[in-house]
Amino acid sequence: MAAVELIKVNKRYGGTQVIADLNLDIADGEFTVLVGPSGCGKSTTLQMVAGLESISGGQLLIGGRDVTDLPPKSRDISMVFQSYALFPHMTVQDNIAYGLKLRKVAKDDIARQVGDVSKRLHIDKFLDRLPKALSGGQRQRVALARAVVRRPGVFLMDEPLSNLDAKLRVEARSFLVKMHHELRTTTIYVTHDQAEAMTMGSKIVVMSEGVIQQAAAPLVVYNAPANRFVAGFIGSPAMNFIELNYADGHVIDAECGIRLAVPEPKRAALDRRAVARVVMGVRPEHFHVRPRDDRALVPPGSCWTIDVRQHLGHGTLLDIRNGPHRAVARSGADDDTLDDEVRSFAIDMDKAHFFDVASGLNLAL
């Protein structure tokens, strides 16, 4: 068993607290991604699990064993850094085998294990090369091989793909997911890239200012964000936020002609809270541009002006405005809108979210 538990974990630097009462359960074999903007505390949390940073308060359990005060070598973990941290004077084979040699594993076992992991990672042809003779993607796989060959209870990865170009990042993401499916080793992965978090994690932990904002499966975080921060951070382009009045089951901006019905059960949730003003969140894919020849009754407030069109090949992003409100809509590759054109947009209100103006909490969860 290699479940990881952080129980009321705190981290302070002098009088400054950067992690406050963090509680997190990571199941055995789970691929958990810590995600958030720079300075949110995700790397500090990972380093506390690794033993590279001391814990100022609280408790850390790995496999049910209290390792709060144990050194890294006693925690049954293996870590992959952003910089790869390969020994430049050692061959690929020696880099992979280094940890096994320190543990005084028999030479025959070392050769067998290095051969097995290098074949699995498709670097068996490079065992005699030095790191400088490898591409970035190959070096990344060597760093992974060195971690994998130890067969630890927990893998810790701190933005290991950030030095790769876009194409290699996509390939490496797929490889890491496949590797996890094969090994089923508990993995904690740190990134600031929400696309990596969505595509790789079985659980996403969204952090901000040292506090966990939400911890759940990727689609739960995407479709039911706990608050405005999570909603705005997860998803690309980001969710649109429009502040509106709420009355009689409708969100309203009379000056812009906006009057949109809130569907049940979200209407009931807003009524229970007796709110008079809300922030409506709508993802770009839930703004739908209507055909010019659509004869259906145009709903109030559905007319928006096209500011900028961004053609992406597979689709088009439209920057649109209605009075003081700004939004991004996602359209098809064959989009025929024009700059400064006024078009009618339908909003999928069943997919809309409603957040408290002051606290940012999702009011309809």
Image (tube, rainbow, N blue to C red):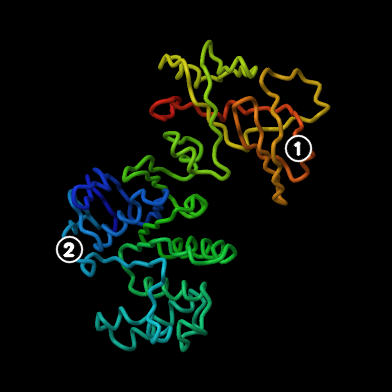
Towards the viewer: 326 or 87: 326
Q: Which residue is mark 2?
A: 70
**Residue 46 horizontal side relative to residue 138, left or right:** left
Which residue does the image show at 24% across and 57% down from the upper left? 62
The circle drawn on residue 339 is 1
Indicate left or right for 191 with 323 as reference: left
Where in the figure is residue 320, as x and y percent of width and height?
Answer: 66, 34
Q: Residue at x 81, y 21 (%)?
A: 295
Residue at far right of view: 293
Between 15 and 91, the one lying in front of the other is 15
User: Circle 1 sits in a helix, a strand or a loop, which is it?
Assistant: loop
Residue 331 in the image: above or below residue 198: above
**Would you call the spot at circle 2 few (<14 residues within 10 Å), some (14-19), or many (20 or more)?**
few
Which class describes the residues within 10 Å of circle 1: few (<14), some (14-19), or many (20+)? few
Q: Earlier in the sequence, mark 1 or mark 2?
A: 2
Residue found farthest to the top: 248
Q: Position of residue 96 (x, y in %)?
A: 38, 80
